[in-house]
Structure formats: structure tokens, C-alpha cells
Image (spheres, rainbow, N blue to C red):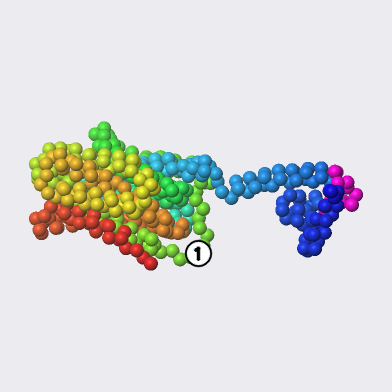
Amino acid sequence: MQPRWSRFQRRRERLRDRGCSWRESQAGSGRIAMSDIHKMRFAHVRHADFRMASCCIVRIDFAINMHFCKFMSASVSLPPDAYRARAAAPYWPLWVTCFLGYAAMGMTIQVMPAYAHQQMGAAAFGAGLAVTIGSLAAMLARPIAGRLADQHGPRGIVLAGSVLGVAGGIGHLLSIDLPTLIVARLLLGAGEGALFTAAIAWVLADTDPTQRGRIAGQFGASMWCGLAGGPVLGAAVLWISGFRGVWIIASLLPALAWLLIVRTPRGIDPTVPTDRAPRSWLPRAAQLPGASNIAAGISYGTIAAFLVPRFDSLQLPGQQLVLAVFGLSFITCRFIGSAWVDRFGARRVLLTSFLIEAVALGGLAVNVTTALAFQCVILAGAGLSLLYPCLATLVSEATPTRERATALGAVTSAWDLGVAFGGPLGGLVAGATNAPPFVVGAVAALCAMLPLMIRRH
């Protein structure tokens, strides 16, 4: 049997024939650091001492490499728990911020018709303009706010939206005639539109892509909860302290929203893209979902305008509860069903929702019993509840980060545009053909499916 030292010498000779030294082979395999090998003197070290030294060097080098790898992995990617903590950090402050902002808007909508008539002496047109001009301002402000959020980060836009809300509330308090009241309504509406657009872009930027549907759906419910709770609060404050108290509370709510966001650490604000590539006001990924959302808004517009009159024309009981039932169905399905968007796919859930909406509105278009009418109302609320999380997921997946907020703002504004046309269009068709206006809503729900079936190559 050959001595172990001679076998070691033969191995060095084979490596030398290949053009590779023993030191390079050991350093390349990661067993021994190159600097440590240069310190060794092979000719003066016995075999036993060399083996002991090699083992020590291997162990030290292995430990250093393990700690280095852990450090690098921690600096490159966050572990799941840390990612969830980072994603959830701004969620609840932003959720409450949107709720407070839209609660202020809901308060003013509740009392605005009476205020415009009694205090400003406005006619029916002026009172209606004072009510709807805020929604128009929100619709126009969303794409602008989204573009600014893409360029400068969403944090500042959320704060600016809150400031506009405060200015709008104070404007209601100081208004002396209808023009100044309309200016205040424009400020309040633009503030709430900017606030929500930047907030949803901020939340989705730090959300795990596999949970975008659930997060978008549950976060979007903040707007609906604010619009539902605001009128109740407005009616209560009006009964206690009159219109002046309503305007004061409507000014304080956006101020509280501003305080919530200004206390949020700046470190969780998403990184602003530094590229100078041209940005579109209507990104391509938002065009088809936006067209679909316009049709969906028309469906909701017919519900908002004609649901209570439909119950009255059919002499069905429960007219005072029908909108509450619709809202309860909407909110419940939004919270429960948003996770389905991630589980089954946004496109599949969206097509199913449009089918449910078309069936529900078709049922309301025929002469129905009370039980069937309420079942259709519940189905209509369920069908509309998952539209936004589905569309937000589709847009977020298809839009580059540098245009995501702009795309989300454009799609949300498309909904407002459809709602604005839904009521007048339903009334026009009903007056011209004697058909129930819900026929328009059902057809619009079916038409909303068409853009989703178009594939762009």
C-alpha cells in the first residue's frame, strides 16, 4: 500500500498536467480560502499536521460562508413574515384614511339638497349640480392623481388629497352663495378622488401578487363603508347642531386622515421609478378593463336611480329597506368573496359576476313578487361586489409599475362615468319604449363581458 503522502504528491502531479494547481482546485471548490493556502508551507509540514490544519481551515471558511450567505439573502429578499409585515404596515392607516375621507363626502351628500334649497335659494338644477359636481371632480382628479403618484410617490398625493378635503369642508362652512359652494364641492370631490387613487396604488405596490384580489377588494370597501356611514352621521349631526355642525365635522374627518398618514414612516413608501420613459394618461392595460367598468357603472346607475321607484310602481312592501339590503349584500360579498379572485382567477370571477348581475337585473325588469324582488336585489349586490377587485387585479398584473397608479385611476374614473350615464340612459329608454329601465342595466352587464373576451396579440 502506498503511503498517503505519496498519493497526495501524485494528485498534485495530475492537477499540474491539467494546467491547474492544487491550491486553485481547493479554492475553486470552496473548501479552503486562497489566502489561507498561500500561508501554508507544504514542504515543511508533516502529513498529520497538514490534515489537521486543513480541517480547521475548512471549518472556519465554511462558517464564514454560511454567515455571508445568510446576510446576502436577507439583504436581497425579505422573508415571508417580513414581507407580510411590510405589506400590512400602511394598510390600516390608509383604510381608515379613505373611510374618513368618503364619510365626509357622504355627510355632505346627505344634507346638500336641503342646504342648497333652504340656505342658498337654489332651484332644482342648482341643487342637483351641487350634489353631483363633487363626483365629477373626483372622476377627473383620479387619473391626474394616479399620474402624479407614479411620478412622485403615493404618500404625498394621499396627504395632498386630505388637505384638499379639509379645504373643501372649510369651503362649505364659509360659502355665501351657490358659486362658492360649488367651488367647495369641487375641492372636496377632487381631494377624495386623489386620496383613494393614491392609497390603493400604495397598498397594491406592497402586496403579495397572490393576494392582490383580496387586498384590493377589502381595501376598496373602505370607500363604500364611508359613503354608507357618512349619510347616517350627517343626518345625526344635522339634527343635533344644524348645517354648521355638519360642515365642521366634514372638515375634521379629512384632517384626522392627514394626521394618520403623516405619522406613517416614510420607509414604507414605495420606491418611485427613476426611468424617464413617456407615460400615457390612459395606459394600454387599462383600456379594455375601463370599457368594461363603464358598462358596469351603467348597471349600477340604473339600480341607484330606479330601484326604489320600481318597488313603488309594483306596490311591493319594503321600499325603505331595499337599498339597505342591496348595500348589505354588496359589503358582505366584497369582504367574503375577494379571496376568490386570487383562488379562481380575476377574469373567471369577473365574467361570472357579470352573468349574475345580468340575471338579477333581468329579474327586476319583470313583474315579480316581493320575495323574488329581494332575491334579485341580493344577487345584484353580490354581482357588483367583486368587480373592482377583479379589475384592479387585472390592471395591476398587466401594467408596468411606473404606470400602475395612472391605470387604476383611469379604471376607477370609468366606473364614475358609467354611473353618471346609467340613470339618464335608463330613463330615456324607459320613456321611449315603455320597457323597465333595468333592461338597460342587464344589457350593459352583458356588454361588459365583451372587452374581457378580446385578446390583444
Residue at image point 73% right, 55% down: 28
Front residue of 208/17: it is 17
Question: Label 1: how many residues lie within 10 Å, few (<14), some (14-19) or many (20+)?
Answer: few
Q: The C terminus lies in which quarter of the figure?
A: bottom left
164 to the left or right of 369: right
Q: Amino acid at mark 1?
A: Arg
Q: Is residue 395 left or right of residue 385?
A: right
Q: Is residue 392 above or below residue 60?
A: below
Q: Which residues are magenta?
A: 38-49
Q: Position of residue 397 (x, y in %)?
A: 42, 55
- The residue closer to the viewer here, 283 or 262, is 283
Q: Secondary structure at mark 1?
A: loop
Q: Which residue is mark 1?
A: 276
Q: How many marks?
A: 1
Q: Residue at x 11, y 55 (%)?
A: 435
Q: In the depicted view, which residue is nearer to us: 371 or 269?
A: 371
Q: Residue at x 30, y 42 (%)?
A: 333
Q: Is residue 195 left or right of residue 41?
A: left
